[in-house]
Amino acid sequence: MHILAKTQATVLAILLGTAGASAQSLSDIKPSPEPLVLQSQGSFFVGGRTVRTESAGWGDLKDIFGESFEAGDVVVDQMYVQFQTPLKPTHPPIVFMHGGLLSSKQWETTPDGRMGWFEYFTRQGFPTDLAEQTGRARSGFNGTIFNQVKNKSLPPEAQPKVFLGTSSMAWKVFRFGPELGKAWPDIQFPVEAINEFSKQVIPDMIETQVPSLLGELIEPETKNPTVANVADLAADLGGAILVGHSQSAGFPTQAVLKGKGGIKGLIQLETGCFSNLTDEQVKALAEVPILVVIGDYMGSNPASACEKEMEQIKVAGGDITFLSLPDVGIKGSTHMFMQGQENIRVADVLIDWIDDHVAQ
């Protein structure tokens, strides 16, 4: 789709905060072709641990409560899961994990009001689960350290970083275009709805859960509670396909390495490969079929990040597939191809791979 100069100027104004963001209304949502019939839907939590806090933040209200609630137990590291089960499932359960600075909204209705993957995969017969990363959105985050810094029981430097997604960062990292407000001429992402997409971007509290974002992304072993929670979820579901994207692209691999079983397949969207796997880790991963999918505008050799892992797993007898969407005729895909105009075409590519590679 060609973006007119006027549209580019409007998008730039919205991103820079010089134009007001209009609210998406129910009339903007495109109706589904037929009723979605479910066996069940709901939500639950996985994991969590109880910690003691000496600073709950209620000290100023002691006169109202009549006693102090500054000290007590709180639950942290839990993971919120939203699910839909079709009336007659035809595929194994599938679990979607969102990327950095985002929440499970990523998989729901697209910014321009079209059907998202949460609904589409359910319609295709998958019991579909959305896992909200621990420390993000409805999973909550461990806020005890912020109160400790506030009351000076910890020094200011103990406070973890809060990662924020700026407009310019999101535009470049999500590959909407070469510079802020200028979209690629054949882009599939609905940049006319960029104001709606920007509402999805939320503070990332990962450093309240794990000590280093960089280490989290490059190390196959991790103490991130989301990964352990997802591994438990797959086992609890009696077997599941795990889908990660961007920051969470490596989570399915890391979940396999927890050794809890129950993982039927891995789908890594926008890389997630590791170049430092041990022989034991390769052996474990060779037992699970793996699909890596990337979009467009990735440079001249987008497969380079996965070459070593792919070679190791294939030598060990494993099943790993690397797929660049432009190579299968889907051009103009950004980092957020699950929300682009091509999102259903990409979903069908994933489902075809599942049908061919994953035990039903």
Image (spheres, grey):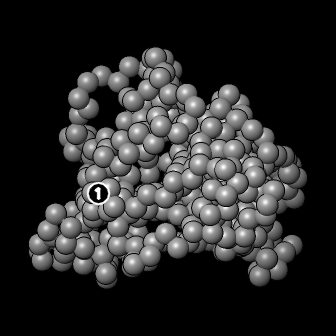
Residue closest to the eye, 83 or 278:
278
The quarter of the picture where residue 353 lies is: top left
Residue closest to the eye, 105 or 142:
105
- Residue 25 is situated, as x and y percent measured from the top left of the image, at 25, 45
Residue closest to the eye, 329 or 315:
315
- Residue 252 is situated, as x and y percent measured from the top left of the image, at 63, 51
Residue at left offset 31%, top offset 82%: 179
The quarter of the picture where residue 352 lies is: top left
The number of numbered discs placed on residues in the rendered structure image is: 1
- Residue 46 is situated, as x and y percent measured from the top left of the image, at 70, 39
Residue at left offset 40%, top offset 69%: 174
Locate the N terminus by quadrant: bottom left
Locate the C terminus by quadrant: top right
Image side of residue 76 versus residue 8, left or right: right
Q: Is residue 6 above or below residue 80?
A: below
Q: Is residue 184 above or below residue 71?
A: below
Image side of residue 12 versus residue 238, left or right: left
Residue at left offset 32%, top offset 56%: 328
Q: Residues within 10 Å of mark 1 (few under 14, many from 20)?
A: some
- Residue 333 is situated, as x and y percent measured from the top left of the image, at 32, 62
Secondary element at image label 1: loop
Q: Is residue 325 visible?
A: yes
Q: Which residue is mark 1?
A: 330
Q: Is residue 226 visible?
A: no
Residue at left offset 71%, top offset 48%: 256
What's under tag 1, amino acid-wise?
A: Ile
